Amino acid sequence: MVVSPLARAGGDFREIEMKKRRVVVTGLGVVASNGVGTDNFWEANINGVSGVDRITLFDASHYQSRIAAQIKEFDPREYMPDKIAKKVDRFVQFGLASTKMAIDDSQLDLGKEDREKIGVIVGSGLGGVLFHEEQIMSAYERDSHRFNPLCVPRITPNAVAAHIAIQYGLLGPNLVISTACASGNHAIGEAFRKIQNHEADVVVSGGAEAPLTQFTFGAYCALRGVLSTKNDLPHEASRPFDRERDGFVMGEGSAMLLLEESNHALNRGAHIYAEIIGYGQTSGAYHMVMPQPEGEEAAAAMILTLREAGLKLSDVDYINAHGTSTLANDIAETKAIKRVFGEYAYDVPISATKSMVGHAIGAAGAIEAVASCLVIEHQIIPPTINYEHPDPECDLDYVPNGPRKAKVDIALSNSFGFGSVNACILFRRYA
Amino acid sequence: MTQDIEEIEKKVIEILADKSGVDGEKIHLRSSLVDDLGMDSLDAVETVFEVEERYGIDIPDDQIQEFKIVQDIVNYLVSRLNPP
């Protein structure tokens, strides 16, 4: 049984020193369009394999954009009971799958744990949109007043964290965070804080999103110029920082990281991928869709993150960019990196996971966090693929097209969300 | 139009198998929804929804609590669908 410092002190609350604790990553799980499962995902990443293809989940023929990074070859029944697989929305299926992978990977023995100290904090921008749309269409077509009783439990965004807790009996803090494209990083960051601040010892944290539906996809198309329309060359459509880029490719999927208090991990001999040493979050208070063109808000988030970790700028060995492949983000992010790092911006390697797996909205930050941990684990940086035409406004080192062996002790991962919300996470090789 | 009792039994068992996750072969008319099929109140409501959709009827909320075994649902449908 874990005895709290308060109990050990005989219940005297006056002099308990609550130092911030250290947080490490001990398990990874990922469901991505270029690989289901961490090994497959990593293999695809270092080989520059794109998960983008023509959309088959619904009829996209009338849309300007007809491509996406869809998850293929995914059977939810491998990761949860059949009955649950049938009752939950696709985003929850993804979330439960990546959670099972992360918990198995961590080899955490839940039977020996105080489950009140294990939380679940997951990012999801959209929740159960697929079921939501299907039910509205169905009721309209049937001219009916009667809705499926599963509507509420299946659509609500917090279903993913709730189902994870139910499946594994986890009684700690349970949250779903919805901050669009930054949801995954916010979830991981908040999980980091929970453990730092003694509110949990372990947190299952990440993101899950299944936005490939008739209406939701159409809604993104309606933003005009945000989604890539390179429909004839799906694999090449997501091209962050390239001069020919024309928007992001929508993705789907999930990733989970098992975050653990460092002594807790050491005591059970857990494998440690990385330590989390910084989390910076800002609002640019600027616009629902456009980033600040000069990158001020993004820079502020990065600076806060580095300041928390107490690092020199040149300590950062790798940046996993938000890198969406939109005209606006890639310039703004490049400027932001220059603002923060000055001359060193030209030396630090930067790569964009979205070049291969598209933009999975609320899951993106989590998928990229897994990638960042694997970079530290393997000391190889995956490429930004489809980089063919240098853009004079994006003139940094984006590790184009091929993987690069590199000494990476410190990795910074950026996520900048619609609504001017920014969250960055800093990972360090554990020592 | 009279509804064949066997058809109704078959359909109800099919729906219950889907919602409970229990194999249809193991569901009998005297099976208890809670004890034998492990159904919770949400499963029960889902079952009623499917039945309502299938037969084009509305079942009052307080009727749902009266369904304890499979036979109860069948009997209710028989009386609703074959009025005297």
Image (spheres, rainbow, N blue to C red):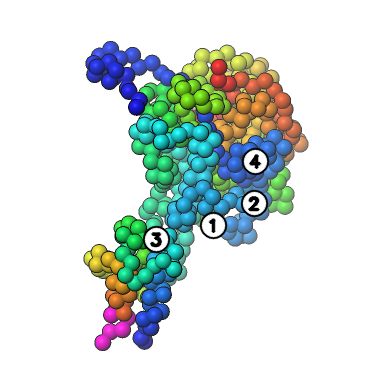
* Residue placed under numbered mark 3 in the picture: B20
The answer to whether marks 1 and 2 mark residues whose Cβ atoms lie closer than 8 Å is no
Kind of residue at disc 1: Gln
The reply, left or right, for residue A307 in relation to residue A32 is left
Q: Residue at x 65, y 27 (%)?
A: A378
Q: Is residue A347 visible to us here?
A: yes
The mark closer to the camera, 4 or 1, is 4
* Residue placed under numbered mark 2 in the picture: A67
The mark closer to the camera, 3 or 2, is 3
Badge 1 and badge 2 both on one subunit: yes
The reply, left or right, for residue A62 in relation to residue A263 is right
Is tag 4's residue or tag 1's residue first in the polypeptide sequence?
Answer: 4
**Cα distance between the residues tagged 2 and 4:** 22 Å
Is tag 2's residue or tag 4's residue first in the polypeptide sequence?
Answer: 4
Instruction: Indicate the position of residue A54 as horizontal and vertical percent values.
Output: 66, 54
Badge 4 and badge 1 both on one subunit: yes
The C terminus of chain A sits in image quarter: top right
Q: Nearer the viewer, residue A74 or A393?
A: A74
The reply, left or right, for residue A138 in relation to residue B58 is right
> Which numbered disc covers residue A285?
none
Instruction: Indicate the position of residue A123 as horizontal and vertical percent values.
Output: 47, 39
> Which numbered disc covers residue A40?
4
Magenta-tinted stretch: B79-84
